[in-house]
């Protein structure tokens, strides 16, 4: 599980202590503040990832803390705490820039679950930023992919981008689905309009409909003001629905109507509003299997799958690894403030080029960053690489099944990769899922599929 830097803000010492202990036990690093002034001082340092803050405090409200922090450029995600009677205030806090709110009295389990969810959101943003810099860099130093597979992807982008066709991008986590979606938008006739990325698995289910379609004032408890939905925000532009397989069935029906009618109706409104939005969807799941299981609507699948772009994992385009190594060594070296040029030993490079990279580009970036820290004399050696890569020298590579259908062989190989990651994480499945760039629920689902097949 990814550890977070968390700030707990409440004027009641007992609440601060209880929350601090619970969050610390969950593996996060915790700071506390007794009021808004102390919280702002801590937040301005810029290293707090999540602020768990009360709204009503003696010196300033939680809303004011959010507003002042956002005005100062602080990128912390705010999770507000409020009593039921002040839900309207919590909604105002979200409008000011807070990520979400929770009702008091809080259950420790709920707080920890929400923090784990936020950790996934932060991880995804970080991964997308890396991939965007690699594939969509605007300067001459951007990494140029050389594999035939990625040249085919570039050709598909050039073909579909000028149209208004709905696009479905599939591929494992870390392969750059978000980058491809943005590239399609940037090469389209809508490039001057909004590109709205939405992670369908990162929005609380009870807020999905309001986030997607908006709501009128008074549409539900806490809706003190009208809200424009994401589809309205994307009008004339493109909306990118990442992790579309996480969308619950009731929202799948409404999304299907949006695609068919090109209109949305806000919660509480009796009138539909016409929109002109291009939809680009992405998933690391197999939607065909979900259709068979009844967890994804077949009619929506066909609506989304008008133009399919399958992104291959990094192991299927090894020609790109060598280029990515050089690019990432340079970019990570600059990020770390290392002024001297760093070379990669030929043996270390060969091992990285031969490795299968189950975590794709994100895993490669992490390995490069780690190796730069360990490297001596401006040279990355074999012993600077993680064990799962360096041990290839000793012949400890996973065997590959050569019998059965392609799907059966791929499933066997995928499970072998997952089991190896779990073994290297000493049985910690959450850590293994994080290393592989997938959600822990996806890891459990893949293991269960083997047991039930």
Image (tube, grey):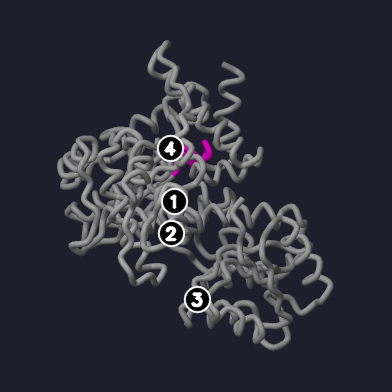
Q: Which residue is mark 1?
A: 367
What residue sits right under mark 4 in the picture?
284
Residue sitting at x 28%, y 45%: 322
Q: Nearer the viewer, residue 36 or 139?
A: 139
**Spatial distance from mark 3 to mark 1, Cα to Cα?**
28 Å
| Earlier sequence position, callout 3 versus callout 4 | 3
Q: Is residue 20 left or right of residue 339?
A: right
> In the image, is residue 359 above or below residue 63?
above
Q: Can residue 270 be seen at all in this image of the molecule? A: no
Residue hosting label 3: 74
Sequence order check, earlier mark of 2 and 4: 4
Instruction: Find numbered disc 3 in the image and state the secondary structure of the residue it sits on.
Output: loop
Determine the CA span between mark 2 and mark 1.
12 Å
Label placed on residue 375: 2
Q: Is residue 441 visible?
A: yes
SS category of the residue bearing label 4: loop
Chain part drawn in magenta: 243-252
Direction front: furthest residue: 377
SS of the residue under disc 1: helix
Residue at 23% of width from left, 58% of height from top?
142
Q: Are marks 2 and 3 in contact (CB under 8 Å)?
A: no
Label 4 neighbourhood size at 10 Å, few (<14), some (14-19), many (20+)? many
Compared to 451, does 256 lie above or below? below
Q: Which mark is residue 221?
A: none
Which of discs 3 and 1 lies nearer the camera? The answer is 1
Which mark is in front, 2 or 1?
A: 2
């Amino acid at each position: 599980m990814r550890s977070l830097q968390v700030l707990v803000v409440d004027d009641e010492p007992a609440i601060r202590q209880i929350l601090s202990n619970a969050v610390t036990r969950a593996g996060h690093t915790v700071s506390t503040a007794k009021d808004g002034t102390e919280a702002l001082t801590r937040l301005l340092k810029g290293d707090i990832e999540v602020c768990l803050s009360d709204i009503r405090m003696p010196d300033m409200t939680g809303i004011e803390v959010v507003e002042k922090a956002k005005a100062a450029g602080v990128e912390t995600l705010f999770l507000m705490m409020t009593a039921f009677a002040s839900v309207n205030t919590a909604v105002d806090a979200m409008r000011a820039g807070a990520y979400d709110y929770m009702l008091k009295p809080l259950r420790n389990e709920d707080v920890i679950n929400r923090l784990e969810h936020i950790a996934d959101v932060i991880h995804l943003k970080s991964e997308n930023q890396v991939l965007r810099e690699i594939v969509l860099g605007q300067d001459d130093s951007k990494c140029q992919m050389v594999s035939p597979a990625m040249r085919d992807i570039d050709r598909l982008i050039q073909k579909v981008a000028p149209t208004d066709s709905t696009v479905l991008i599939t591929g494992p986590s870390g392969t750059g689905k978000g980058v491809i979606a943005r590239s399609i938008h940037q090469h389209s006739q809508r490039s001057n309009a909004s590109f709205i990325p939405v992670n369908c698995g990162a929005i609380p289910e009870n807020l999905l409909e309001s986030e997607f379609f908006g709501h009128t004032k008074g549409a539900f408890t806490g809706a003190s003001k009208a809200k424009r939905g994401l589809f309205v925000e994307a009008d004339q532009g493109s909306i990118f629905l990442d992790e579309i397989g996480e969308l619950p069935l009731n929202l799948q029906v409404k999304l299907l109507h949006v695609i068919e009618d090109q209109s949305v109706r806000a919660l509480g409104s009796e009138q539909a509003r016409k929109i002109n939005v291009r939809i680009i969807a992405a998933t690391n799941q197999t939607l065909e299997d979900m259709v068979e299981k009844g967890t994804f609507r077949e009619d929506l699948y066909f609506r989304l799958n008008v133009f399919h772009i399958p992104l291959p994992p990094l192991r299927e385009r090894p020609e790109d690894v060598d280029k990515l190594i050089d690019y990432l060594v340079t970019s990570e070296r600059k990020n770390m403030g290392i002024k001297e040029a760093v070379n990669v030993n030929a043996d270390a490079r060969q091992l990285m080029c031969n490795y299968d990279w189950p975590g794709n580009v994100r895993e490669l970036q992490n390995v490069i960053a780690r190796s730069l820290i360990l490297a001596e004399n401006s040279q990355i050696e074999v012993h600077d690489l993680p064990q799962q890569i360096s041990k290839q020298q000793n012949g400890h590579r996973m065997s590959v099944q050569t019998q059965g259908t392609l799907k059966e062989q791929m499933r066997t190989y995928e499970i072998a990769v997952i089991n190896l990651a779990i073994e290297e994480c000493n049985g910690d499945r959450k850590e293994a899922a994080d290393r592989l760039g997938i959600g822990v629920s996806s890891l459990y689902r893949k293991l269960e599929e083997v047991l039930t097949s």
